[in-house]
Image: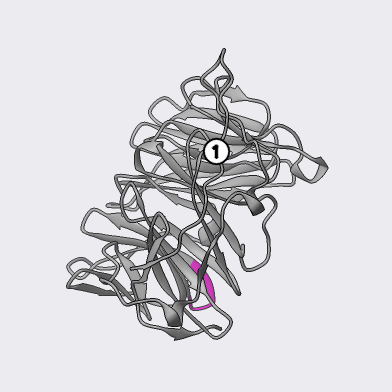
């Protein structure tokens, strides 16, 4: 791996709490790893299911995906769930090399479709009007709807498992019992990221365009603050929630040019920088990241364990 060393920024913990607060600007907290895909050593291929052209690749298994511009959401029983543009319509599909392709939803892009960690359900959010949204939970094996909910405002499903979902947005967040249909509000802020398996939730205390800061806490005790930042927002939680990837607050466009890897209490572990932008971010393990890294001329999937980085795919021209 190509190694880049930088001094870590340390953070102080208040004596009366276990909360660790951001104490220095992220841009100067550590010398960033400058990721230039063409200059990185080639390592092992990506171990997670991923897209290559029009196929899902999972080890030696290859599954064809119909349509164009596919997004892979993850594994499901007997196959994989993807969102693809088929015949001019966005479709959520379960694709497999052993079963026929099954349509799970139509007319919704990947931004509004969330796959449960176990792959058995997807949640599809549709705006029913300017003031409410309809969320359908669909079984990936049968394609049948198992639950429908109507929510005020502009919410979306942030995460779900077999029994429950977290629904959040600018008007607060709720836990949604998928068996009974009952919802319980737990946060009145702008909740934008949640992970049931790692017991993590991130929210803006107020409108981020008006100076709202990110607060990170646990789902079981949302008032118990783990970390706070007015410059960064949470991008991805690691398995078990001990680490996270953050990016500049209010990142828009193609994607950020900076990413930070931190502990759940905010301690900086590594900092990454790229010439063009970062795309997809995924955890290959509890400590190893996969970053779609777009340089000015070429892009590749880059694997980073801390500040040790290598290329995990072939080079492709940056579109």
Q: Give above or below for 88 relative to 170.
A: below
Quick check: is 78 in the magenta stretch? no
Instruction: Where is residue 253? Give x, y as percent.
Output: 68, 66
The number of numbered discs placed on residues in the rendered structure image is 1
Query: Quick one: SS at disc 1?
Result: loop
For image coordinates 29% across by 56% down, the residue present is 75
Q: Is residue 197 left or right of residue 30?
A: left
**Main SS category, magenta section:** strand
Is 262 in front, or is 123? Answer: 262
Is 300 in front, or is 95? Answer: 300
Q: Which of the image's four quarters has the C terminus?
A: bottom right
For image coordinates 56% across by 43% down, the residue present is 9
Instruction: Where is residue 286? Give x, y as percent.
Output: 33, 46
Instruction: Where is residue 191? Give x, y as percent.
Output: 62, 36
State the residue lying farthest toward the top: 16
Residue 215 visible to the viewer: no
Q: Is residue 316 left or right of residue 231?
A: left
Q: Which of the image's four quarters has the N terminus?
A: bottom left
For image coordinates 59% across by 69% down, the residue present is 277
Q: Give above or below for 198 relative to 308.
A: above
Give the residue number, with chain letter if any, for mark 1.
Answer: 10
For image coordinates 60% across by 74% down, the residue present is 275
Q: Which residues are magenta?
A: 86-90
Instruction: Where is residue 129? Give x, y as percent.
Output: 71, 47
Q: Give above or below for 314 relative to 75.
A: below
Instruction: Using the rendered view, name the quadrant where residue 190 is placed.
Output: top right
Is 218 in front, or is 272? Answer: 272
């Amino acid at each position: 791996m190509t190694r880049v060393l930088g001094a870590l920024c340390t953070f102080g913990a208040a004596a009366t709490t276990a909360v660790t607060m951001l104490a220095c600007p992220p841009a100067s907290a550590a010398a960033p790893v400058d990721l230039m895909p063409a200059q990185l050593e080639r390592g092992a291929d990506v171990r997670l299911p991923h897209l290559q052209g029009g196929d899902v690749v999972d080890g030696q298994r290859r599954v064809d995906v119909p349509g164009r511009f596919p997004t892979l959401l993850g594994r499901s029983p007997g196959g994989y769930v993807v969102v693809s543009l088929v015949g001019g319509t966005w479709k959520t599909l379960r694709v497999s090399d052993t079963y026929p392709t099954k349509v799970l939803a139509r007319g919704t892009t990947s931004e509004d479709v969330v796959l449960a960690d176990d792959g058995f359900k997807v949640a599809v959010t549709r705006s029913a009007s300017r003031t409410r949204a309809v969320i359908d939970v669909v079984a990936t094996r049968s394609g049948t709807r198992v639950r429908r909910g109507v929510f005020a405002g502009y919410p979306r499903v942030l995460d779900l498992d077999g029994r429950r979902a977290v629904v959040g947005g600018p008007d607060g967040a709720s836990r949604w019992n998928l068996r009974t249909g009952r919802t319980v509000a737990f946060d009145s802020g702008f909740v934008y990221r949640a992970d049931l398996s790692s017991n993590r939730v991130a929210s803006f205390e107020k409108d981020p365009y008006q100076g709202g800061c990110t607060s990170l806490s646990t789902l079981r005790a949302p008032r118990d603050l783990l970390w706070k930042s007015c410059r960064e927002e949470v991008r991805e939680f690691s398995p078990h929630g001990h680490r996270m990837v953050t990016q500049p607050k209010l990142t828009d466009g193609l994607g950020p040019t900076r990413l930070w890897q931190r502990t759940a209490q905010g301690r900086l572990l590594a900092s990454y920088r790229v010439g063009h932008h970062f795309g997809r971010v995924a955890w290959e393990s509890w400590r190893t990241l996969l970053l779609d890294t777009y340089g000015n001329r070429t892009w590749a999937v880059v694997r980073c364990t801390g500040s040790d980085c290598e290329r995990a795919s072939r080079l492709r021209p940056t579109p």
